[in-house]
Image: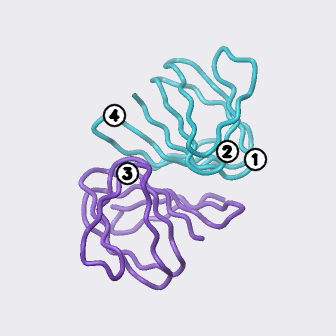
Chain colours: A purple, B cyan
Amino acid sequence: MISENQYFDGNVKSLGYETIDGKSTIGIINPGEYKFGTAQKEIMTVVEGELLALLPESEEWETFRAGSYFEVPANSSFKVKATSQTAYLCQYR
Amino acid sequence: MISENQYFDGNVKSLGYETIDGKSTIGIINPGEYKFGTAQKEIMTVVEGELLALLPESEEWETFRAGSYFEVPANSSFKVKATSQTAYLCQYR
């Protein structure tokens, strides 16, 4: 099954699927700033475009370009900013 | 806008967006074999999982793992096979 999800009034949409290593989603983030909470550890990889991320316990925004990734621990929150539509992969591992 | 598309009875779903270089989609392919036609040139990159592809004018299936890509010219068709849910990026350039 391919699940369909949307958040922030449709400004973030994702498709969910399963791999042998765990669940994943791919999604698109419209320009803007968003705060996400995590239930599990997440590995976020930028597929196309660019994200700025404010990670838990960090005070500085970091830039992540296509091909780069960041990890977010379970039960935390992080913010991302996009200035153009950006595609990401999120792996719950 | 983030467009939502589905094909083959929901066995392939994608999300469409725009970049400064042209349109792109990211999507998920369920296990199975599918034939796609192209209107424009497409660059298909495997994001997670693995695809077998039978490219135009080729007689052999080639394997593409995460991070690898293939190009398909405009106005042609190609087949892909997946044995597990596979995520891809398709860039129309």
Q: Is residue A60 above or below residue A68?
A: below
Distance between the Cα atoms at labels 3 and 4?
14 Å
Identify the amino acid type marked 1: Thr
Residues marked 2 and 3, same chain: yes
Residue corresponding to mark 4: B22
Distance between the Cα atoms at labels 4 and 1?
30 Å
Residue corresponding to mark 3: B2
Q: Which of B57 and B33 lies nearest the eye of the viewer?
A: B57
Q: Chain of mark 4?
A: B
| Residue at the (50%, 43%) spot, across then down | B89
Secondary structure beneath label 1 = loop
- Give the residue at the far bottom of this rendering: A75
Q: Are marks 1 and 3 in contact (CB under 8 Å)?
A: no
Earlier residue among tags 2 and 1: 2
Residue corresponding to mark 1: B83
Earlier residue among tags 3 and 4: 3
Residue corresponding to mark 2: B50
